[in-house]
Amino acid sequence: MTEKPVFIALDFPDAESTRGFLKPFSKLTERPALKVGMELFYSEGPDFVLELKRAGYTIFLDLKLYDIPNTVGHTVARIARLNVDYLTIHAIGGEKMLAAAVANKGESLKLLAVTQLTSLSENEIRETQLTSATIAESVTHLAKIAYEIGVDGTISSALEADLIRKHTSDQFLRITPGIRLSGDGVGDQTRVTTPQKAKIIGATGLVVGRSITQAENPLAAYQQVMKEWRD
């Protein structure tokens, strides 16, 4: 499993387009880590995930599970059989749901708790969740619950990474989406930063989508992200 991974978000509709995108990356000595989201998973199913695993990729399955504890526990057990490396669940599902996921994940699967989506602004969180809490307060609260239950880390904006570290531990993973190279548009994200800034403020891994997948030269864009992240 890649240490301090950079996941390419495979925001493609099907296996064919995904294979075409990945072809230039096959020349790399170190295969990139990949995030398979709901669109691609629901389109192609578990068999395509197994195909990517057999090809040597580290796989982050981003399904953001959120249901009653029994359902989530059984689902995590099934997903663990796919031998994926990371899986997301919603921290807002509560302690019992998180505990059921932890109890069924096996030894190798790492669970990442979603705190607040990077597409949400503070005003949107307050209005839709009927809360007076700030983003920082909400993210900290949810991260602490996940940490205490035994979840392996969080998915949150890099802007909250150091705050999460201070309230959990250095070993608690802080995987951060909303990453853009300098000069790229933010799209539908609101809390974004660059790979270099994310490293400085405490991220332990990145998720990068459009800055790579929609670049004129995706391989070069990926290599630029890796350079900023590792240098």
Image (tube, helix red, strand yellow):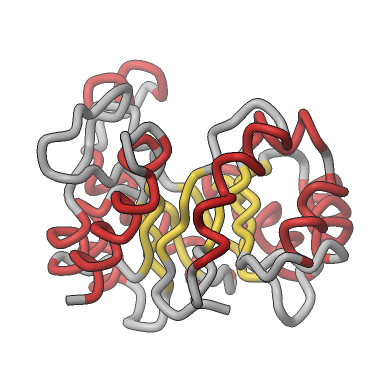
Q: Position of residue 167 (x, y in %)?
A: 29, 70
- In the rendered view of the protein, which quadrant contains the N terminus? bottom right
Relative placement, left or right, of 100 versus 197 is right
- In the rendered view of the protein, which quadrant contains the C terminus? bottom left
Relative to 20, say whether 137 is above or below: below
Please report the residue visible at 61 percent of the width from the left and 50 percent of the height from the top: 89
Relative placement, left or right, of 131 versus 104 is left
Relative placement, left or right, of 113 versus 171 is right
Relative to 58, say whether 120 is above or below: above
> 66 or 83: nearer the eye?
83
Please report the residue visible at 71 percent of the width from the left and 30 percent of the height from the top: 14
Number of numbered discs overlaid on the protein picture: 0
> 174 or 26: nearer the eye?
26
> 227 or 125: nearer the eye?
227
Q: Position of residue 178 (x, y in %)?
A: 31, 42
Please report the residue visible at 19 percent of the width from the left and 45 percent of the height from the top: 181
Relative to 68, say whether 187 is above or below: above
Q: Position of residue 86 (x, y in %)?
A: 62, 63
Q: Position of residue 223 (x, y in %)?
A: 31, 61
Please report the residue visible at 24 percent of the width from the left and 75 percent of the height from the top: 230
